[in-house]
Amino acid sequence: MSSRNPYSHLEIESLPRLPVPPLEHTLSFYLELLEPLLTPEHFQDVKQKVAAFAEGEGKVLDQELRQVADAASTSWLEGFWETMYLAYRGEPPINTNPCFTFSPTPDMSQLGRTSQFVEAIVIYWKLLQKNLIPHDKGEKDAPLCMTQYGRVFATARVPVSGRDKVFSYTDSKHIVVLHRRRFYSLNVLTEDDKLIPASVISQGLQDILNQTPEVRGSGLLVDTEVSDGIAEGGLGIMTATDRDVWASLRGKLLANHHNRRLIDLIDRAIVVIALDDESPNSPEAIINQFLHANDGTNRWFDKLQLISAPNGEISWNMEHAPFDGHSLLTISGYLWDHVRGAKKFNTESLEFASSASPASLKIEALDFAISRKLRETMISSWEGFRRLIAQTELCVLRFSDFGADYIKKQGLSPDAFVQMAYQLAYYKLTNTVASTYESCMTKRFYHGRTECVRSVSRESKQMCTVLANTAASSRLPVTDKYQLLKDATERHVKTMNLCKVARGVDRHLWGMQQLALQKRDRVAFYEVPDIYLDSSFPTFCTSVLSTSNCGGNAFQLFAFGPVTGNGLGLGYMIKNNNIDICISSFMGHARAFRSCLVETFAQLRSICDQRAAATATAAAVTSPSSSPKAKL
C-alpha cells in the first residue's frame, strides 16, 4: 500500500522540475488578464495594491515559495494541489468527479462489452507494472511525466476528517462489481497472477446479475437493529456525501471486523464496475446516469468506476484527486483500440489462465452489517445528494455543422475558436464577461498536473462588445469582424502556450496565497496582503465558466458540474467535423446557453464564410489575366 505512485520506473526524474515563474511576470500577466473583468476605477486601485505587493510581502512570499520548490522532492505544487482536492469536504460526484462516455465498439452488449473492457484494463495494468507501456511523448516528442499512471488502478480515496488520503495497491487480483446497490468481489487474476479471459469474466458478471435480488422493503434484515442498508441507498451513497460525515461513518464501520474486511476489498479492487439496470436513450440521459446515477445509488465514488448500461453504453466516473483527465484519456485510447480490435496490446509477456472457469472468479457477495443509527445517516446523506442532483441541469450540444477541419481552414485554432464562442454566447446572455477556466496539462515537468488558462482578455472582450451589438456589427466590414475574432483567438493561443511552460498566473498566485494563509495562522498579527483581500481576486479566481477540452476518439461525451453556484461547466470535444459539448448549471441556465451557443457558432461561421468569399473576390480582381503562350 502506498500513498504515492508505487512504481519507481514511472518516475522520470530527468524531467525538469515545475518552475516558479518570475514574480514580475506573474503580476504583470495577472493585471493583463484582470483588467477586462473590472471597472476602470477598480482596476486602477488594484494596480496600486499589486505594485505594493510586488515591492513588499510579495517578494517575501515568492522567496518562501521558491524555498518550498527547492526542498520539494517532486513538485512545489503537488502538496498544495492534493490538499485542494483531499481537503474539499463537499460531495465529489458532480463537483469534482467527471464522467467520460466511450465511443461505440463492435460488441455493444452489456456483459460482452464490459468484460472486454475489464480484460483490457487488467492487461494494461499488468503491462504498466512490467514497464511495457510506451512512455508518453508531447510536442516535438518531448517526454511527459508518467507518475499519475501508477495511481489510476487499484487506488482508493479514503475519507479522513479534515483531509482525505489516497492509497494505491500493487498486489490486487480482483475487481468489485456493483449491481442494485450490492457489492461483489470478482477475481480477474488467478493466485499465480494469470489473467482470466473476458469470456469467463462475462459469465461471472451474468452470475451476479442472476443472483442480485430486487431492491425492496427495508433490505435484507439480519435483525431489527441491523441490515445491509440496501433500502437506504446502499453503502455507496456515503461516497456521495460530506467527507467528514463519511469519515465518521466509515470509522464506525471499521470497528466491526466483518465490515473492515469488506471495505478493504473495495479499497484494494483494481477498478469498480457498476452494472446498471437502466438504459439511457439520449445524450442527456447518458450524462445524467453516468455523472450522478440519477439517484446517486449503485456507485462508489471514491474509486475509478466503469459504469455499464444494458444497451451497451459504458462510461468512466473518475475520482479526480490522484490523476487528471489527460492520463485517463491516454489510457482509454489504449483500451478502446484494444477492445475494438484496431490495435491490440502485446500480451506476449503475460499469461492467460486458459483453463479458467467461473469458479476461478471466486465471486463473493459483500453484505455489510449496518446498524439502525448508521442507516439513519445513510438516509440523510441520500436525501442531501438527491437535492444536489435535482438542482443540477445537464444538457448536450451535438453540433455537426462544422468541426476542427473547417476552423483550421479559416486560419484559426479550433480550441481558441470554441473558447471565443463561449465568451460571445455568455456575453449575449449577460451583457458582461466572467472569469473563465480552461485546463492546461503541464506533464512536461516532473509530477506536473495542470495550469489554468484564463480565456478572458482585452481582445476577447472587444470581440464580444462589438459582435454582440447587432447594430454596430452590421456596420462593420466583414474583414474587421473576422479580425476581431482572429485577434481574440491568437491572444488565447499565446496564453495557452505560456501556461504549457508553467508561466501562467493562477498556480503561482495561489501558492503564495496558501503560504500567506499559513503564516496568518501561526504568526501573531500577520496580515494577508491586500492583493488577496480585494474583491478583484475572487473575481479573477472564481471560474464562472469552467471548461475543459478532451480530445481523442475513444470518448463521445465528457461532463462535469459547475465549480460555482452561478457558473457553467463545459466539457467539450472538438472532432474533425463536429463539436460535442456537455453543459451543466446549478441555476437552470444550461439550455439557454446551449441555444445561444448554437446561434453564436452560426454567426462566427457566417463571418468566416463572408470573409473567405470577400478575399477570393479581391484576389480574382487583382490577379493579372494570363496571356497566351507564344508558339515556338
Image (cartoon, helix red, strand yellow):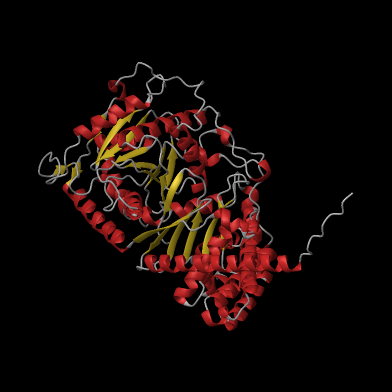
Residue 40 in which image quadrant: bottom right
Residues 58 and 285: in front is: 285
In the rendered image, residue 204, in percent from the top left (x then y), is placed at: 28, 28
Residue at image point 58% right, 45% down: 447
Residue 263 in which image quadrant: top left
Residues 426 and 41: in front is: 426
Residues 520 and 89: in front is: 89
Image height check: is 283 above or below 199?
A: below
Q: Is residue 324 left or right of residue 353?
A: right
Count of marks, rendered view: 0
Q: Is residue 464 left or right of residue 303?
A: right
Position of the N terminus, as image quadrant, is top left
In the rendered image, residue 362, in percent from the top left (x then y), is placed at: 29, 25
Residues 355 and 476: in front is: 476
Image height check: is 116 above or below 293?
A: above
Q: Residue furthest right?
A: 632
Q: Residue furthest left?
A: 224
Is residue 536 shown to the viewer in this render?
yes
Q: Residue furthest front?
A: 631
Q: Is residue 320 left or right of residue 314?
A: right
Is residue 519 shown to the viewer in this render?
no
In the rendered image, residue 548, in percent from the top left (x then y), is placed at: 50, 56
Image height check: is 63 above or below 143?
A: below
In the rendered image, residue 472, in percent from the top left (x then y), is placed at: 56, 82
Q: Is residue 477 left or right of residue 271?
A: right
